[in-house]
Amino acid sequence: MAFLKLDLHDIFNDSKSIERELNRVLDEAHEKKIGCIEIIPGKGSGQLKKRVIRFFEQPAIKRRYHRLEKDSKNFGRVFVHLKF
């Protein structure tokens, strides 16, 4: 399965950039009909991962994907499975 990868390590402290990148990768996945996005917020304190999950829980965003999966083997990784 093809997927896109977004590593948030470089912009972890820039709120606007984080949201912009999450929107960008979601748009790109839809345009290219890619079924999965791998987002790497990193392990850290878990705040960035919570922020990513809150972003995807917004009603307007939630309609754009099928399922959000927290990697059980790697705490610092989230998968977003899209629907078309």
Image (tube, rainbow, N blue to C red):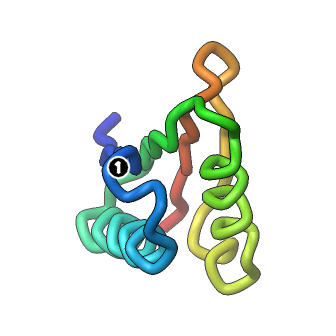
The picture places residue 7, in percent across and down from the top left corner, at 35, 45
Compared to residue 76, the image places residue 69 above or below, namely below
Q: Amino acid at mark 1?
A: Leu
Dot 1 crowding, Cα within 10 Å, few <14, some 14–19, many 20+: some
Q: Indicate left or right for 58 with 41 as reference.
A: right
Q: Which residue is mark 1?
A: 6
Compared to residue 76, the image places residue 47 above or below, namely below
Furthest residue toward front = 13
Query: How many labels were placed on the picture?
Result: 1
The picture places residue 27, in percent across and down from the top left corner, at 36, 75
The picture places residue 32, in percent across and down from the top left corner, at 24, 64
Mark 1 falls on what kind of element?
A: strand
The picture places residue 44, in percent across and down from the top left corner, at 60, 33
Residue at image point 55% right, 50% down:
80
Furthest residue toward left = 32
Residue at image point 68% right, 37% down:
45
